[in-house]
Amino acid sequence: MNFAALRYEELSLNTFPSLHTQVYDGWILRFREDGDWRDSCVLPLYLSTRSYEDKIDFCEKKFAARSLPCAFKMTSNVPSALDQQLEQRGYALMGKTRVLECRADGLTVHLECGEKKQPKPDLRRKDNRIEAFICEKGEIIARGLGVFEEDTLGLYDIHVNREHRRKGAGTAICRALMEEGFRNGAKSTHLQVLASNLEALSLYRSLGFQEIYLYWYRVKNG
């Protein structure tokens, strides 16, 4: 059992709650009619007592009743037998994502790129959230969000306008959020990045992030 994966999945459920949630024999069903299969899916987080076949049938009926595609969010804690059974039933593998973590003592120095150093990001704090952004000529060219949950800070929506990439803006946004989080008592920061996004993975690893688990989706074809 990867307890870090279990913890971060629970934190994610609390940070971004669904409109409707149902717990069924250790699986959590999330429904959100205005989202996609990432927002409405089944999370097999805990041990099961019923057969996978019966449980998958149950989930498919629940999602069909809401006219939603049935999808499963899988982690390294999920038995391979369930992943194989979903594949046999026509569930495609999609959205493979790496979850990275940096402890408070793990933040490393990253050399800025480009001809000029990016300005220090502005920060706005409201409740348990921190917004970071960099402006140039009145336009926001980079931004990011940090969300406190227990003793960790999750980084979300890190974005740099295309024409301003490879100049250190993304690094500056991440460092500002991480440093603010650590100053306010966070013991770690974490984020999610698509496994195929090698450029972002390189940036995050240069800041001291290390992979703690992998997750992916199984989505019903059709």
Image (spheres, grey):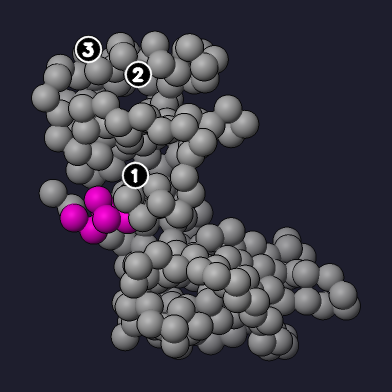
Which one is earlier in the sequence, the residue at label 2 or at label 3?
3
Mark 3 residue crowding within 10 angstroms, few (<14) / some (14–19) / many (20+)? few
Q: In this view, does 109 lie to the left or right of 43?
A: right
Disc 2/disc 1 C-alpha distance (Å)? 20 Å
Q: Which amino acid does label 2 sit on?
A: Cys
Decide: is 133 above or below 216. Answer: below
- 220 vs 157: above or below: above
Q: Which mark lies nearer to you, 2 or 1?
A: 2
- Front position in the image: 120 or 35: 35
The residue drawn where x is 52% and y is 17% is 66
Name the residue nearer the viewer: 60 or 158: 60
The answer to which quarter of the image holds residue 220 is top left
- Spatial distance from mark 2 to mark 3, Cα to Cα? 9 Å
- Which residue is the site of mark 1? 215
Horizontal side of residue 207 vs 187, given as left or right: right
Residue at 50 percent across and 83 percent down: it is: 180
On the image, the x and y values in percent for residue 202 come to: 46, 67
Q: In this view, does 140 lie to the left or right of 191?
A: right
Mark 2 surroundings: few (<14), some (14-19) or many (≥20) residues within 10 A: many
Per the rendered image, the range of residues in magenta is 3-8
Can you tell which mark lies on residue 54?
Answer: 3
Q: Looking at the image, is mark 2 or mark 1 earlier in the sequence?
A: 2
Q: Main secondary structure of the magenta part?
A: helix
Residue wearing tag 2: 59
Residue 106 in the image, given as x and y percentages of width and height: 33, 82
Badge nearest the viewer, 1 or 3: 3
Q: Where is residue 31 drawn, in percent x and y?
A: 48, 29
Residue type, numbered disc 1:
Tyr
192 shown above or below 183: above
